[in-house]
Amino acid sequence: MSTNAERRRGRRTVRWAGMAVAVAVLVVAVVGVWQAVVNRPRAASSSGQIATATAAVSRGTVTERLQIAGTLGFDGSYSVAHQGTPGITTWVAEAGSTVDRGGSLYAVANEPVRLLIGTLPAYRDFGTGMPDGPDVKQLEENLAALGMRPGKVDAKFTADTVAAVKRWQAAWGLPAAQRTGVLPLGTVVFAPVPLRVGQATAAAGAPLGPGAPVFSATSTGKVITAQLTTDRQRSVHAGDPVQVSLSSSAPVPGTVVKIGRVAVASSQNQNQNGPNQNNGEMPSSSVTITIQATLPPTAADLDQAPVQVAITTRAKQNVLLVPVTALLAKPGGGYQVRLESGGYQTVTPGLFDSTNGTVEVSGQLTVGQLVQVPAP
């Protein structure tokens, strides 16, 4: 028994020791990168002297941003499946096209299947004598939106509903004899939003039976999605402001609208079970965040385009600011800036704004005072 206890204590000791080493390495790496930025060599002039310029100490707002890669694409994921009688596929909407309320999605035996907007899938025929239900109300809401005058919108399939369906069938171009006022199952497909057609599963000329997938789809609205590692999840919240950088335009504003709740292992760890075999660390995981942005016209045709996302995680107002290139490592530890006069002033760095290249500082500096920076 004592031997087993000692082994367990030994394993815990090794585990904690490994974590301590990892933390120490991380701290050294961060400090090393910071010093590399603030102490980078300054270009020498032809006379051999260091070329410098000056920048004024300012007071303002500093914003700390988290930089991650993202993808610009279309929101949502939907699958369109056939629910009507078996037949031969005669037409499928083109990939990349959009289908709005009342539009045709595909056709079987040359009979188009049309899109209506709603969250409840079609599951039965629509016609006179059918029991009341929320699907009837959903149909009548669509008929009203299409201008077909279904009368009172409720859960009852009434004579007014029949007349509205007949008017809709007339709008399709059906002759009077085929305007039945009935919509058999499979005549319409309900989706929560207008659809943008994706990859087709069914092809013209191929047989199509009940339940067979026809194509995948998305909404017509564009969003940016990005993978946020779970160790950073607490620093990002729905509603946080974002800057989105596209290769074809200047950064545009956006907002985090959704943060996923289900963490997924990173791609490099998907084939591993348990700790990483190389270093004993657990595989990293991430959640998907969704961002809405005010996109430029040049982004209208972009899909699955790479973008850079800068999420505002913290901000401070009315603080002293200097360019980050003004910071110098101080002998013995800490940081300082060199004044225009050539003297040095100790400062304590705070938040760093990676977008503007400024850093919050505290110390004996005043607004307008000039500090030295590398010459451009």
Image (cartoon, rainbow, N blue to C red):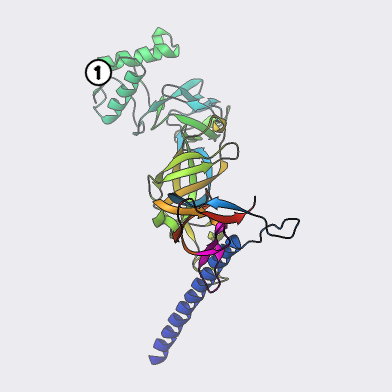
Query: What percent of the width, then of the height, locates residue 57?
Result: 49, 52
**Displayed quadrant of residue 25:** bottom right
164 relative position to 295: left or right: left
Camera-side residue of 373 and 22:
373
Q: Residue at x 31, y 23 (%)?
A: 141
Q: For the view shown, which residue lies furthest in the top direction? A: 176
Callout 1, which amino acid? Thr
Query: What percent of the width, then of the height, locates residue 77?
Result: 46, 39
- Which residue is tagged 1? 158
Magenta span includes 115: no
Q: Is residue 315 visible?
A: no
Q: For the view shown, which residue lies furthest in the bottom direction? A: 2
Q: Is residue 216 visible?
A: yes
Camera-side residue of 31 and 217:
31
Q: For the view shown, which residue lies furthest in the right direction? A: 46
Q: Residue at x 30, y 14 (%)?
A: 149
Query: What percent of the width, then of the height, locates residue 320?
Result: 44, 54
Camera-side residue of 338 and 176:
338
Camera-side residue of 140 and 214:
140
Query: What percent of the width, then of the height, locates residue 139?
Result: 32, 24
Magenta highlight range? 326-345
Disc 1 crowd rating (10 Å Cα; few below 14, some 14-19, many 20+) is many
Of the 4 image quadrants, the one containing the N terminus is: bottom left
Q: Residue at x 63, y 61 (%)?
A: 40
Magenta span includes 333: yes
Dot 1: element: loop
